[in-house]
Image (cartoon, rainbow, N blue to C red):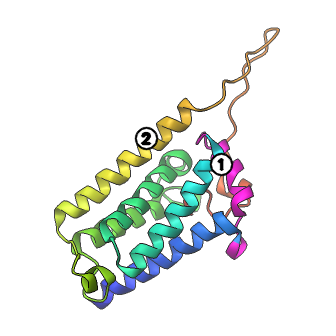
């Protein structure tokens, strides 16, 4: 009971922090104007709605998780954000966070899946409202929904990407640049 509450509150609060960094520039974050170029450079088009979506997903999903409200949905929102971060930022760097890898994101996915499976516990709004859900099917649902939304967002972003200018006079095409956490000034890039 206490461990579950501690995990929910710690993970949820940290996601609220990351989301508000992206939305409002709190905690030394880039703010909404700084998050838009990041989403654009990650090929998540259109940039403005995707910047808003990532900030709301992290802040809103984190708040719901911390409160233990709509817990499987909160978990799926955060899982989707982390899957997107792995695919767009961290996967190419391997697993270790010391090299900009995805280990931190993967731990957060596993923690959110575990919380969805075990439920938010008795100290939660879900419990208070009598809508608490738990069991393996809720963990699988949170993982599946998070993965599906991540895939849809990435596919939609690629489809909405502006066409690259055609090379002229035998020039090689320009490679797409990607902002990494260290070069963007953002705390941790898409998925801190």
Magenta span contains residue 129: no
Highlighted range, magenta: 26-45
Foreground disc of the pair 1, 2: 1
Quadrant containing the N terminus in the rendered view: bottom left
Is residue 133 among what the camera can see?
Answer: yes
Residue 11 or residue 162, whichever sits in front: 162
Q: Which mark is residue 85?
A: none
Q: Work out whether mark 1 precedes mark 2 in sequence or the reverse, and give the earlier one.
A: 1
Q: Please report the residue visible at 35 percent of the width from the left and 79 percent of the height from the top.
A: 68
Looking at the image, do the residues carrying marks 1 and 2 touch, with CB atoms under 8 Å apart? no
Q: Which mark is residue 152?
A: 2
Residue 7 or residue 102, whichever sits in front: 7
Residue 67: image location, x then y, percent: 40, 81
Tell whether 77 sits left or right of 145: right
Tell whether 114 sits left or right of 58: left
Q: Residue furthest top?
A: 169
Residue 105 or residue 65, whichever sits in front: 65
- Element under disc 1: helix
Residue 14: image location, x then y, percent: 52, 75
Q: Which mark is residue 48?
A: 1
Magenta span contains residue 40: yes
Label 1, label 2: how far apart the Cα atoms are:
17 Å
Q: Please report the residue visible at 32 percent of the width from the left and 52 percent of the height from the top.
A: 145
User: Is the stretch drawn in magenta largely helix, strand or loop?
Assistant: helix
């Amino acid at each position: 009971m206490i461990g579950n509450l501690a995990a929910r509150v710690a993970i949820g609060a940290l996601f609220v922090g990351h989301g508000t960094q992206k939305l409002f520039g709190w905690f030394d974050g880039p703010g909404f104007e700084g998050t838009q170029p990041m989403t654009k450079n990650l090929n998540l088009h259109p940039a403005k709605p995707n910047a808003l979506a990532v900030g709301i997903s992290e802040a809103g999903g984190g708040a719901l998780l911390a409160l233990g409200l709509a817990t499987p949905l909160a978990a799926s929102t955060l899982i989707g954000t982390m899957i997107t971060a792995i695919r767009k930022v961290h996967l190419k760097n391997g697993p270790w966070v010391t090299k900009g890898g995805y280990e931190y994101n993967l731990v957060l996915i596993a923690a959110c899946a575990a919380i969805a499976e075990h439920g938010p516990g008795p100290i939660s709004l879900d419990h208070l409202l009598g809508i608490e859900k738990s069991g393996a099917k809720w963990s699988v649902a949170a993982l599946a929904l998070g993965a599906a939304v991540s895939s849809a967002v990435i596919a939609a972003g690629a489809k909405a990407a502006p066409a690259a200018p055609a090379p002229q006079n035998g020039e090689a095409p320009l490679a797409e640049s990607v902002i990494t956490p260290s070069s963007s000034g953002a705390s941790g890039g898409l998925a801190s």
